[in-house]
């Protein structure tokens, strides 16, 4: 998205950015509280749970790249979340806020900030780092960000975690690349006439 295609800075003043960042923080806080109430606090370490904070921070500091990385994480995350729900995974109302609320706010922010090309591979590297963080600091039995084992929905297709992990590495990159292309196409403003 070219700078000329973005909303003028005067349209998005600090009170507006602060309100959007506040809503993003509220989404994260509600999701965290819901996990705490349910006794499954480790679940907050799923990558998508952090996207509202990424979008909120991006809006506050006017970082198109951070916002784009969050959106690319959701391109993959919303797809995987949908597959998990279709496979019988549990639905939580705060997950809807995390996945769809943050997406809407991130897209709003991208209309103003832009969507830098090459965000997909940066998002992929960040997700890889986040997965390894969860591998170091979360319990293996929770399998947060599939850092330890094959996801139950994929067990019929894979028997080896290393093969599964490498497959996901490349599949995730492909989905993130496609997600960036889709976002950039959606965010293009039609020309005059």
Image (spheres, helix red, strand yellow):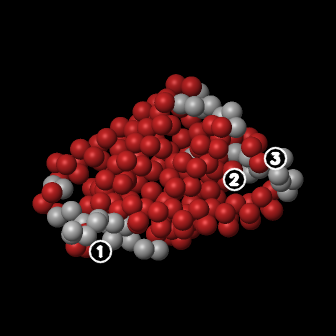
The vertical placement of 175 against 51, above or below, is below
Q: Where is residue 180 in the image (x, y as percent from the top left)?
A: 48, 65
Q: Which of 103 and 163 is in front in this view?
A: 103
Classify the position of the C terminus by image quarter.
bottom left
Observer able to see residue 28:
no
Residues under labels 1 and 3: Cα distance? 44 Å
Crowd tier of the residue under label 3, counting other residues whose Cα lies within 10 Å: few below 14, some 14–19, many 20 or above: few
What quarter of the picture does the N terminus occupy? bottom left
Query: In the image, 18: left or right of 80?
Result: left
Q: State the mark number for residue 147.
A: 2
- Residue at the outermost top position: 37
The residue singled out by tag 3 in the image is: 155
Residue under numbered circle 1: 2
Query: Which callout, 1 or 3, points at the residue further toward the start of the chain?
Result: 1
Q: Which of marks 1 and 2 is in front?
A: 1
Secondary structure at numbered mark 2: loop
Marks 2 and 3 close (CB-CB < 8 Å): no
Name above or below for residue 124 compared with residue 77. below
């Amino acid at each position: 998205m070219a700078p000329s295609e973005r909303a003028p800075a005067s349209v998005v003043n600090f009170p507006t950015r602060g309100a959007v960042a506040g809503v993003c923080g509220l989404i994260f806080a509600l999701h965290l509280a819901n996990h705490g109430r349910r006794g499954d606090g480790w679940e907050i370490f799923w990558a998508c749970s952090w996207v509202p904070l990424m979008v909120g921070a991006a809006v506050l500091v006017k970082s198109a790249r951070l916002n784009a990385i969050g959106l690319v994480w959701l391109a993959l995350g919303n797809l995987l979340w949908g597959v998990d729900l279709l496979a019988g995974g549990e639905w939580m109302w705060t997950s809807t806020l995390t996945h769809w609320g943050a997406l809407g706010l991130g897209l709003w922010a991208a209309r103003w900030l832009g969507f830098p090309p090459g965000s997909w591979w940066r998002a992929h590297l960040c997700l890889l780092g986040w997965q390894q963080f969860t591998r170091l600091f979360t319990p293996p039995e929770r399998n947060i960000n599939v850092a330890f084992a094959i996801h139950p929905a994929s067990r019929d297709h894979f028997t080896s975690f290393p093969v599964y992990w490498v497959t996901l590495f490349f599949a995730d990159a492909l989905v993130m690349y496609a997600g960036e292309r889709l976002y950039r196409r959606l965010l293009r403003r039609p020309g005059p006439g």
